[in-house]
Image: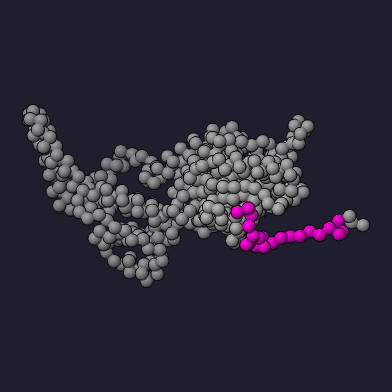
Amino acid sequence: MNANKNTSTVVVRPDLLTGRSLKHFQLEGLLGEGGMGVVYRAQDTQLHRPVAVKVLSSALTSDPQRKQRFLLEARAAARISHPAIAQIYFADEENEVTFIVMELVDGKTVRELVRNRELDLLGAIDIGVQVADGLAKAHDLGIVHRDIKPANVMLTRDGHVKILDFGLAKLLDLDSEPPAGEAGRPDRSPMARTQSGVVLGTPAYMSPEQVRGVPVDFRADIFSLGVLLFEMACGRSPFQRDNFMDTLHAVAFDEPPRLNSLQPHIPDELQRIVSLCLKKRAEDRFANARLLADELKLLRRDTEAGLAPKTAWRQRFDEAWERLRHLTPSHYVWLGLGGVGLGLAVYFSLTQISTGSLILLAGVIFALYRHVRNRPHRVQELFVRRVSRIPEVRLIAFRDRQVTVVVDRPVAQLYSRINNQLRGCNRKLYFGEPLTVSILQEVSPDQMHKMLSSPGVHYVRESEVQRA
């Protein structure tokens, strides 16, 4: 006879905890479920603020020593204070329910942003910068996340990144540590542990060390961030396969595809950074997350500035000559005045005129230069050059000082990026009213055709021309 015949197993549905209190936290509604537990929106009745409460699965906390170790780890993680890390407020247990209380983040996970195609290249790089900064702070305190993945990184409505679940992933790895007296034995790998049905971590985002079951350090987080960067840039994980075991094998042994083989517009510098993050040996990766953050910041600056490979001097000369041939008569007048001014400056400097007169003449020449260089239509051309590089931009049109930009969809931080470019261009205006911008998302085919037929169109994406 089965010894457990009379033993009943009660499975509590997650939503049944709604309305219940854990300590001084009133659970109000279900936010989500995952492999580690269930997350509720809750109210802190002492401090009167909304919080997120994660109730951990009993399968992860059934062992008393393991549970106690987790609580210590979670409380250690609560010491981390950084804008990119969701703050841990409290960790405890009540009536055999182990839970952790965290900052309630209002926004979307990177998984949602990737799935809905709401990330552009600069948005992906910016998220990488903020995650690397947050990890650097945690690593300085000796805390490793161990489970960096799209579902654990959120982008708030105001564009700030929050890393979730610090202090939880260590709980997953406790089984990999040999018990007392068995320190000489190799750790059990995740492959072995999966035979009992326990899946530790998210395979496609694990580091090779985690797959092999060896001890990990902060460089495991750098590998996982490399996977995250790859997925944000290309829309897919480099190691995701059809089943769990194949995915583990890919993480441990397969080289990731090149980014620009999946997305041709990816900069070579991003390919270099991601490749360095995804080295199989931990010692071959970035030495620390601070260095990775610095590299990503340089990449963001260069990408946002639209830096291109240097153009050969012969090509520059040909382009300048071509522009000169198509100038209007008024442009030739301004060039003539500029040439005369420059000639006078040289002449008077050679005849040793007084310093005051030379300064006055230099000021006049500088004013003429600013007028020629930064007249409004040049500022418009600068705006078009910069904004047309954004893949989501379909059309840019001008009517007096009003700019209309038509975009595909409101990707993360797209509006702020366009407005930042506009502010930078307006700062270059020497005189006249500043440019203003209207950003349109939903444009009907008739509206688009009307815009294309109107004067003032400075840029049209090639696909729109073919469609018209």
The answer to whether residue 325 of the structure is visible from this angle is no
Residue 81: percent from left, percent from top = 51, 42
Q: Position of residue 297 (x, y in %)?
A: 44, 41
315 or 272, which lies in front? 272
Query: As rendered, which of 404 and 94 lies closer to the eye?
Result: 94
Q: Main secondary structure of the magenta part?
A: loop
* Relative height, residue 378 to residue 293 (above, below): below
Res 115 → quadrant: bottom right
At x 59%, y 47%, the residue is 90
The residue drawn where x is 46% and y is 37% is 294
Residue at 59% of width from left, 61% of height from top? 28
Quadrant assignment for the N terminus = bottom right
Q: How is the image coloured?
A: one colour
Marker count (numbered): 0
**Residue 403, position in %: x, y?**
30, 59
Residue, far bottom: 446
* Outermost residue toward the front in this view: 46
Quadrant of image for the C terminus: bottom left
- Looking at the image, residue 192 sits to the left or right of residue 225; the answer is right
Residue 144 higher or lower than 447, as above or below: above
Q: Position of residue 6 (x, y in %)?
A: 86, 59
As drawn, is 454 to the left or to the right of 256? Answer: left
Residues in magenta, as a range = 4-24
Residue 11 is inside the magenta segment: yes
Q: Residue at x 22, y 55 (%)?
A: 433
Q: Is residue 433 visible?
A: yes
Furthest residue in direction right, as rendered: 1
Residue 107 within the magenta-colored segment of the rendering: no
